[in-house]
C-alpha cells in the first residue's frame, strides 16, 4: 500500500489536490517565517531583553497568528494583516512611551517600592499582585535571606525586583578604600576557529607579525589548532586550543 492510500488519497485527482495543499502549506509556512522575522526586527530587541506584560502577550499573539497563517488553507492575507497590525501597535506604544512620561506610566507601568528602610508596603505588594511569601522568595533567589540586609526593594515595570543592599552588607568598592584602579577594557577576539580576524587584530593596534610572534612564544605554530585567541586591554594574548575530545561530565554528577 502506498503513501497516498494510507492517507486516504487513492485517485489521481485526490493526489493532485493533496499535493497542491501540501505545496500551499509549505509556501505559506515560509511566508509566515519571513513575515515574523521582519516584524520582530521592526519591533526591536526590547521584546526579548525588557519584556513587559503587554510585550509578552503581544509576542505570543503574533506567533499564534503566524502559526495560523502557516496552516490555513484560506487566503493568507487576513492573518498577515493581523500580524502587521499587532506589530504596528507594539511599535506605536513603544514610540509613545519614549515621548511621553504619563503615557509610559500607563503603557508600561511604574516602579513600585515594596520594601524600604525596614518597612514593607502592603498596598504596593497588593498592586504588584504579590504576597509577602512570594516577595521573600524573590529576595532569597537574589541571595538575601534576611530583610535586615536590604535597604530598598523595587518592583520594576518589566516585573523584575531590584534590590539595594544595606550599607553594611554591600560589597566593598575600590572607592571605599581610596583606590583608583585602572579601567579594564573588554578582550577582543583575534583568532576564531583557526582564522585570523584581521579587522579585530588592527583594532587592538597589532598586526599579523605580532600575532605570529605571540603564538610562537606560547608554543603554537599552526592556526588550525586554535579554537579561540583573544587580546585584552594590556595587549596580552590568551590562546585556547581546539580540543576535539569531549569533557568528562562525571565531574559534576
Image (tube, helix red, strand yellow):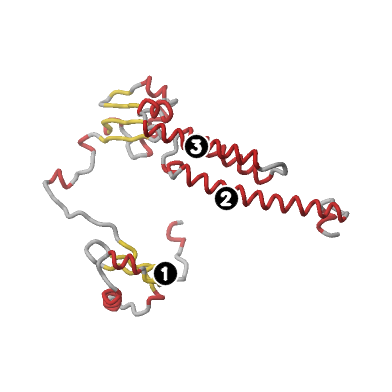
Give the percent coordinates (x, y) of residue 219: 31, 78
Mark 1 crowd level (few <14, some 14–19, many ≥20, 10 Å Cα): some
- Verify CB contact (< 8 Å) between mark 3 and mark 2: no
Residue depicted at 54% across the width and 36% down the height: 86
Residue depicted at 29% across the width and 23% down the height: 119
Residue depicted at 55% across the width and 46% down the height: 36
In the picture, the quarter occupied by the N terminus is bottom right
Q: In which quarter of the image is residue 213?
A: bottom left
Where residue 193 is drawn, which disc sits there? 1
Depth check: give the residue in front, 47 or 7.
47
Tag 3 residue: 56
Q: Which mark is first along the chain, 2 or 3?
A: 2
Q: How many marks?
A: 3
Q: Classify residue 116 as left or right of residue 155.
A: left
Q: Nearer the viewer, mark 1 or mark 2?
A: 2
Tag 2 residue: 34
- Verify CB contact (< 8 Å) between mark 1 and mark 2: no
Q: Which of marks 3 and 2 is in front?
A: 2
Q: Classify residue 233 as left or right of residue 39.
A: left
- Verify CB contact (< 8 Å) between mark 3 and mark 1: no
Which element is circle 2 on?
A: helix
Determine the CA span between mark 3 and mark 1: 37 Å
Which element is circle 3 on?
A: helix
Q: Classify residue 30 as left or right of residue 170.
A: right
Depth check: give the residue in front, 245 or 112.
112
Give the percent coordinates (x, y) of residue 217: 26, 77
Mark 3 crowd level (few <14, some 14–19, many ≥20, 10 Å Cα): some
Determine the CA span between mark 3 and mark 2: 20 Å
Depth check: give the residue in front, 144 or 121.
121
Q: Classify residue 97 as left or right of residue 118.
A: right
Give the percent coordinates (x, y) of residue 45: 44, 45
Amino acid at each position: 500500500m502506498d503513501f497516498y492510500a494510507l492517507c486516504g488519497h487513492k485517485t489521481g485527482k485526490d493526489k493532485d489536490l493533496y499535493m497542491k495543499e501540501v505545496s500551499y502549506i509549505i509556501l505559506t509556512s515560509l511566508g509566515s517565517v519571513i513575515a515574523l522575522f521582519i516584524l520582530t526586527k521592526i519591533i526591536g530587541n526590547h521584546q526579548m531583553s525588557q519584556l513587559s506584560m503587554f510585550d509578552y502577550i503581544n509576542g505570543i499573539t503574533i506567533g499564534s497568528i503566524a502559526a495560523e497563517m502557516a496552516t490555513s488553507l484560506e487566503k493568507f492575507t487576513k492573518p498577515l494583516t493581523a500580524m502587521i497590525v499587532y506589530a504596528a501597535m507594539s511599535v506605536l506604544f513603544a514610540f509613545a512611551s519614549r515621548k511621553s512620561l504619563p503615557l509610559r506610566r500607563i503603557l508600561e507601568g511604574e516602579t513600585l517600592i515594596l520594601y524600604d528602610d525596614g518597612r514593607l508596603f502592603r498596598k504596593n505588594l497588593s498592586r504588584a499582585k504579590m504576597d509577602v511569601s512570594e516577595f521573600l522568595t524573590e529576595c532569597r533567589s537574589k541571595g538575601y535571606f534576611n530583610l535586615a540586609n536590604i535597604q530598598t526593594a523595587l518592583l520594576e515595570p518589566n516585573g523584575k525586583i531590584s534590590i539595594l543592599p544595606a550599607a553594611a552588607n554591600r560589597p566593598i568598592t575600590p572607592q571605599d578604600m581610596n583606590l583608583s584602579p585602572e579601567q579594564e577594557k573588554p578582550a577582543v577576539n583575534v583568532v576564531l576557529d583557526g582564522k585570523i580576524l584581521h579587522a579585530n587584530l588592527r583594532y587592538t593596534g597589532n598586526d599579523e607579525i605580532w600575532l605570529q610572534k605571540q603564538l610562537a612564544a606560547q608554543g603554537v605554530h599552526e592556526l588550525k589548532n586554535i579554537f579561540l585567541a583573544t587580546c585584552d586591554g594590556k595587549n596580552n594574548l590568551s590562546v585556547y586550543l581546539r580540543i576535539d575530545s569531549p569533557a568528562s561530565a562525571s565531574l559534576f554528577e
